Image (cartoon, rainbow, N blue to C red):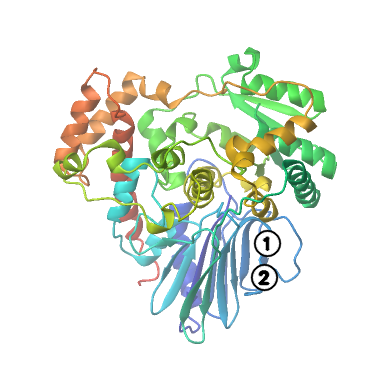
């Protein structure tokens, strides 16, 4: 729900009151335009200025420290820099007179963006806020390449080349006395334990029970229930380990409720079997004009990922949840293991890591006047690392923090989010599993089946696919017209895309998806340049 700005000044005086007026300009950047939000919260202490828009009732605030998210354990000194990091899913900002520390959870389910200069440290859960504070915008050329090729910002990228995301397993520590920044990184390693699967299954059961026994939430929280394994596991463990029965919600087209093996139908059946309250939100016929939808999509999510097809209702669902008193969502994001892979290229593509040279030859890329693109060394397969271990390392260090976290950003203007299956204890155990028990979540699925009522798991989604999106003539025409106004990308490349979008011949290139990514690049360039004109602290 909330967005936070956290500024630490190297030298400070009593000038903070003037910032209270200036920083309120951020409301025009961060607050949703189409529904009423809670009043913003501003406070400062010891040279640290903190500004929170639409503050959530789940926020933890003490002294100069703020937790954005949910802890799974109670640590009395959670707010003190350099103390133990709590388990949970969150973005944690801790500060005092001598230190500032920025921490995300084990797999960075919520991103912290930061800029460090000789005079200040700016950190925020919003890139747009950072750019508005900086007062100018410098488009990152690497981000353009990654958005074109993969529909993401790419590893360690932001829209502005000066901004950095806090990466997985990293604690940012600022020594305020010497104005020195230190990044402490915990490497992500998979150990492939030799223990038999029965013992590991028992360990998994124990750690899931322990995690869910500690989770607390009120009546304003809901569990999105599908017909799959992840949300079913959450519901089962909440009931069995914590005696909690959350409100369950499902959404999609109304006909999905009567389709066997559909997400919605299975979810309703499971809720009835377990005697939990279940609400279905039909999305039939709710579709905004595509230009309006795209603007909302980029406004709420800051253009981090290209999954527009999941929000064709114009965020009607999420606004409805907020207006009906839902303030938190228990999501089923997980890291139990990814799909089978057969080659290095397969590892990358199944994690959403698609490079330009997966789509075109080097000669074609040069002809389009696009810059060369390469994989960061940290993402390359390590010596003696199996394909499956490499696959799941990239899932933990790329897919979760750069795709799933970006999708969660879409929802955060409306609700708080917790991800119990991404608990530090659970993730640490998963990284000990051998490859075969992780592939396709084998051990986790076996455990869930053993605990579940005797009913099928879904094989069909309740919502419409991206293929359905681009089959609509008005949307295809909008994307084609948008290419004409693109001033960021090379003209040769734009002409190539326009020809591809008009062609009826089959192609391995999805021209409409790439046209959508071009539109995202153009619109974010315009939006962020406008944000920069606020120039709030005159850096």
Q: Secondary structure at mark 1?
A: strand
Label 1 environment density (alpha carbons within 10 Å; few <14, some 14–19, many ≥20): some
Q: How many marks?
A: 2
Image quadrant where one finds the C terminus: bottom left
Give SS at disc 2.
Answer: loop
Q: Which mark is residue 60?
A: 1
Please tell me the numbered disc located at residue 374: none
- Please tell me which of labels 2 and 1 falls first in the chain: 1
* Spatial CA span between label 2 and label 1: 9 Å
- Judge from the rendering whether residue 372 lies leftward or rightward of residue 416; answer left or right: left
Q: Depth check: give the residue in front, 354 or 78.
A: 354
Q: Is residue 9 visible?
A: no
Q: Nearer the viewer, residue 289 or 258?
A: 258
- What is the x, y in percent for residue 352? 43, 40
Q: Quadrant of residue 298?
A: top left
Identified at 61% across, 43% down, the residue is 334
Residue 112, image x, y percentages: 50, 60
Residue drawn 78% across and 22% down? 454
Q: Position of residue 332 (x, y in %)?
A: 64, 40
Q: Dots 2 and 1: beta carbons under 8 Å?
A: yes
209 w.r.t. 113: above or below:
above
Residue sitting at x 62%, y 19%: 262
Q: Which residue is mark 2?
A: 79
Taking the view exactly as shown, the residue that stands out farthest to the bottom is 177
């Amino acid at each position: 729900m909330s967005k936070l700005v956290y500024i630490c000044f190297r030298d400070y005086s009593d000038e903070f009151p003037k910032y209270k007026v200036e920083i309120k300009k951020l409301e025009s950047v961060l607050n949703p335009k189409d529904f009423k939000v809670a009043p913003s919260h501003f406070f400062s202490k010891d040279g640290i200025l903190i500004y929170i828009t639409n503050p959530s009732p789940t926020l933890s605030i003490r002294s100069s420290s703020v937790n954005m998210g949910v802890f799974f354990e109670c640590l009395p000194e959670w707010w003190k820099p350099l103390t133990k990091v709590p388990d949970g899913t969150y973005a944690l900002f801790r500060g005092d007179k001598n230190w500032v520390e920025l921490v995300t959870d084990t797999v960075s389910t919520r991103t912290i963006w930061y800029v460090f200069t000789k005079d200040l440290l700016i950190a925020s859960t919003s890139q747009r806020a950072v750019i508005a504070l900086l007062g100018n915008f410098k488009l990152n050329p690497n981000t353009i390449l990654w958005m074109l090729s993969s529909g993401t910002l790419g590893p360690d990228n932001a829209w502005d080349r000066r901004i950095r995301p806090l990466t997985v397993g990293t604690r940012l520590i600022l020594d305020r006395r010497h104005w020195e920044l230190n990044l402490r990184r915990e490497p992500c390693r998979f150990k492939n334990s030799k223990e038999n699967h029965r013992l590991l299954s028992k360990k998994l059961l124990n750690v899931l029970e322990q995690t869910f026994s500690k989770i607390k939430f009120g009546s304003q929280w809901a569990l999105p229930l599908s017909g799959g394994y992840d949300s079913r596991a959450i519901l089962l463990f909440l009931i069995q380990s914590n005696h909690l029965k959350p409100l369950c919600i499902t959404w999609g087209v109304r006909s999905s409720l009567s389709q066997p093996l559909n997400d919605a139908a299975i979810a309703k059946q499971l809720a009835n079997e377990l005697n939990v309250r279940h609400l279905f939100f039909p999305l039939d016929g709710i579709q905004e004009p595509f230009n309006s939808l795209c603007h909302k999509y980029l406004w709420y999510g800051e253009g981090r990922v290209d999954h527009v097809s999941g929000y064709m209702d114009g965020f009607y669902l999420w606004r409805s949840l907020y207006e009906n008193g839902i303030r938190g969502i228990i999501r089923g994001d997980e890291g139990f293991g990814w799909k089978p892979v057969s080659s290095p290229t397969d590892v990358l593509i199944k994690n959403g890591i698609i490079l330009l040279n997966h789509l075109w030859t080097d000669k074609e890329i040069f002809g389009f006047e696009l810059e060369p693109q390469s994989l960061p060394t940290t993402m390359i397969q390590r010596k003696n690392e199996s394909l499956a271990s490499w696959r799941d390392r990239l899932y933990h260090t790329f897919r979760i923090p750069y795709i799933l976290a970006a999708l969660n950003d879409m929802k955060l203007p409306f609700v708080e989010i917790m991800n119990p299956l991404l608990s530090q204890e659970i993730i640490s155990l998963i990284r000990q599993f051998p490859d075969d028990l992780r592939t396709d979540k084998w051990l986790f699925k076996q455990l869930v089946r053993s605990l579940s009522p005797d009913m099928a798991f879904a094989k069909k989604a309740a919502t419409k696919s991206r293929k359905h999106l681009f089959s609509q003539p008005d949307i295809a025409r909008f994307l084609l017209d948008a290419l004409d106004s693109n001033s960021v990308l090379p003209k040769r490349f734009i002409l190539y895309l326009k020809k591809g979008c008009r062609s009826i011949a089959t192609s391995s290139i999805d021209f409409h998806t790439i046209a959508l990514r071009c539109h995202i690049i153009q619109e974010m360039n315009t939006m962020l340049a406008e944000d920069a004109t606020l120039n709030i602290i005159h850096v």
